[in-house]
Image (cartoon, rainbow, N blue to C red):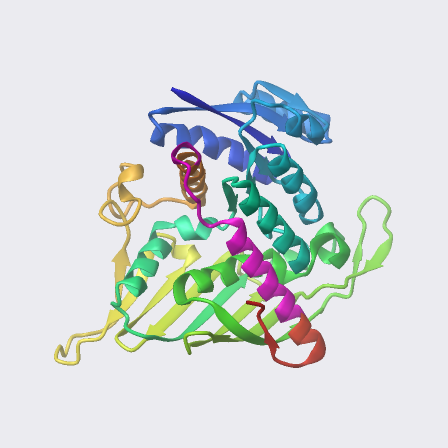
Amino acid sequence: MRVINIAIIGAGWFGDVHAECYLRAQTMLPDVKVNLHTIADINEAAAIKCKEKYGFDRYTTDWHEVINTPEIDIVNVCVDNKLHKEMSVAAIRAGKHVFCEKPLADTADEAVEMTAVAEEAGAVNMVDFHYRKIPALAELHRLIQDGRLGKIYHIKGMFLQDFGFDPTMTWRYKKALSGGGSIVTMGSHVIDAVRYLVGEIDEVSSIGQTFIEERVYPKTGEKDTCDVDDAMTVLLKFKNGAIGMLMTSWLCHGCRHHHELEVYGEKGSAKFNSERLNELELWLDDPKDPLNGKKTVYIGRDNIYGELFNLKTGMGVGVKESITIQHRDMIQSIVAGQVAAPSFRDGMKAVQIMAAIIEASDNHTWVKIPD
């Protein structure tokens, strides 16, 4: 039995989630032993807590130890955006496969470099766009690919939250640390989703706004200025002729975690809402049927990924299941010597689109997406 040794850099909330999901992926990989080898974090207490909770072999406060450990196969990067490139590139050059949190990088140039390094090395690489692995969204992708909605005319995507009403200053509100505002934190997911469903984006125009211009450091009480968008609205032109609209904001009361997608085509339409994670609202046009209308489709055992969790239709899966599927897919790709998806290239395209959206907002113009 092949052993795949996992190291996670970053023992915060998402590092914790990824550790759990690697253990859960073991149940889907009967011919592979998934071993949690090392957890790394500069906060020693956090590293020790994660090690004991999930049974890692060891912990370290120096991420370079992960890079220099020969037996580690996968390095999972779960740290601040500004560190993604340095850690990922170092891991790949040391012969590791890399799973990186989104966004892939702070800048488009960094994302291009990371993708080139990974592809040249032949390393299996993935970026955390786990919504692709949500069964309902995967089923919507299949509907579109199979032509059930016909030619796609337009799409609307939203990712709305309300955490921005907290006046505390964090790294998310400084562009030098985050790369951007709501269009980066939430927009990376919705941008990847519209690419996944409709295809490549050709051109964007946008308007962004910083509504809360100052925030407070909780330890010192000192105020500092915010230089990223609190909200962004985007117009899209796709290479296949479709058009679309995106909206991101972390200042939406009542939206704790609202990711919504509406797709309209010549033969039908569909709607996905993350607050109803195991449903699709579907309309398949049949002009001869007087009772034709929108219907709710419950995604479950007979749909994509339905066999993995042994749940009856109507019971439902959550976001952690989608991350578990990502980890399964990555390990299977390593064993089979295949390319995994969503890859660094998908992450690179998202960063390029985010950069174009920010440029379009700053300059009040349309911006082409690099080929």
Q: Give above or below for 5 relative to 207.
A: above
Image label count = 0
Q: Could you tell me if residue 347 is visible in this image?
A: yes
Q: Is residue 350 left or right of residue 65?
A: left
Q: In the rendered structure, which segment of residues is drawn in magenta?
A: 334-358
Which quadrant holds the C terminus?
bottom right
Q: Residue at x 45, y 42 (%)?
A: 323
- 329 and 175: which one is in front? 329
Q: Position of residue 335 (x, y in %)?
A: 41, 32
Q: Position of residue 75 (x, y in %)?
A: 58, 34
Give the prevailing secondary structure in the magenta stretch: helix
Q: Position of residue 309 (x, y in %)?
A: 31, 37
Which quadrant holds the N terminus?
top left
- 110 and 165: which one is in front? 110
Q: Give above or below for 286 relative to 83.
A: below
**Could you say which quadrant of the image residue 289 lies in?**
bottom left
**Could you say which quadrant of the image residue 84 lies in?**
top right
Q: Residue at x 40, y 69 (%)?
A: 262
Q: Residue at x 55, y 60 (%)?
A: 349
- 122 and 136: which one is in front? 122
**Could you say which quadrant of the image residue 100 lies in?**
top right
Q: Could you tell me if residue 107 is visible in this image?
A: no
Q: Residue at x 81, y 50 (%)?
A: 217
Q: Is residue 166 left or right of residue 32?
A: right
Q: Position of residue 243 (x, y in %)?
A: 45, 77
